[in-house]
Amino acid sequence: MKRLLICCFLLLPATAQAGLAEVRDTARQNNCTPKKIEVVRQSVGATAQTTYQVECNLPKAKETANAAASSLVIKCELNLCQAMR
């Protein structure tokens, strides 16, 4: 019975283990103070990945900034995150 229970847990799909703390830390390392964090894409399985879009708090400027310039895409595998753009 124990073996059956262990096998059931091994067959469950896994998701990326990185949480919002890792995403915030990666954003701060890339000079982005996070304002809003959204999950863009999530895959499960042996190569589980989660992709986040982070909106940054930027200082106010006289010129209007591009919306794409104020966001950052972060990709996480397991508990490791890296900035994509």
Image: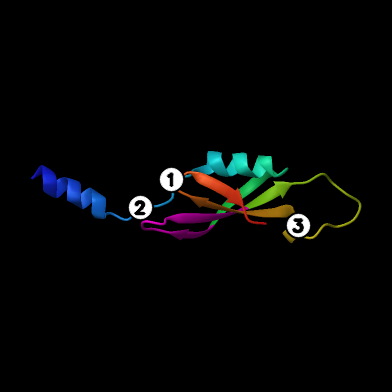
Give 32 or 60, whichever is nearer the viewer: 32
Q: Crowding near pointer 3: few (<14 within 10 Å), some, many (20+)?
A: few
Which colour assignment does the render follow? rainbow
Residue at 63% x, 48% y is: 36
Q: Crowding near pointer 1: few (<14 within 10 Å), some, many (20+)?
A: some
Q: Nearer the viewer, mark 3 or mark 2?
A: 2
* Lower sequence index among marks 3 and 2: 2
Residue indicated by mark 3: 69
Q: Measured from the top left, where is residue 51 in percent x and y?
A: 54, 56
Question: Residues under labels 1 and 2: Cα distance?
Answer: 8 Å
Residue indicated by mark 2: 14
Q: Measured from the top left, where is residue 1 in percent x and y?
A: 8, 45
Identify which amino acid the numbered label 1 is placed on.
Gln
Q: Measured from the top left, where is residue 3 in percent x and y?
A: 12, 46
Magenta span: 40-53
SS at mark 1 in the image: loop
Give 65 or 4, whichever is nearer the viewer: 4
Identify which amino acid the numbered label 2 is placed on.
Ala
Q: Are marks 1 and 2 in contact (CB under 8 Å)?
A: yes
Prevailing secondary structure of the magenta residues: strand
Residue at 49% x, 55% y is: 50
Question: Residues under labels 1 and 3: Cα distance?
Answer: 28 Å
Give the side of residue 65 with respect to residue 23, left or right: right
Residue at 91% x, 52% y is: 62
Look at the image and say whether residue 44 sits in the magenta stretch: yes
SS at mark 2 in the image: loop
Q: Which mark is residue 42?
A: none
Please determine whether, in this image, residue 48 is positioned above or below residue 31: below
Q: Which mark is residue 17?
A: 1
Quadrant position of the C terminus in the picture: bottom right
Give the side of residue 43 with respect to residue 83, left or right: left
Question: Residues under labels 3 and 2: Cα distance?
Answer: 32 Å
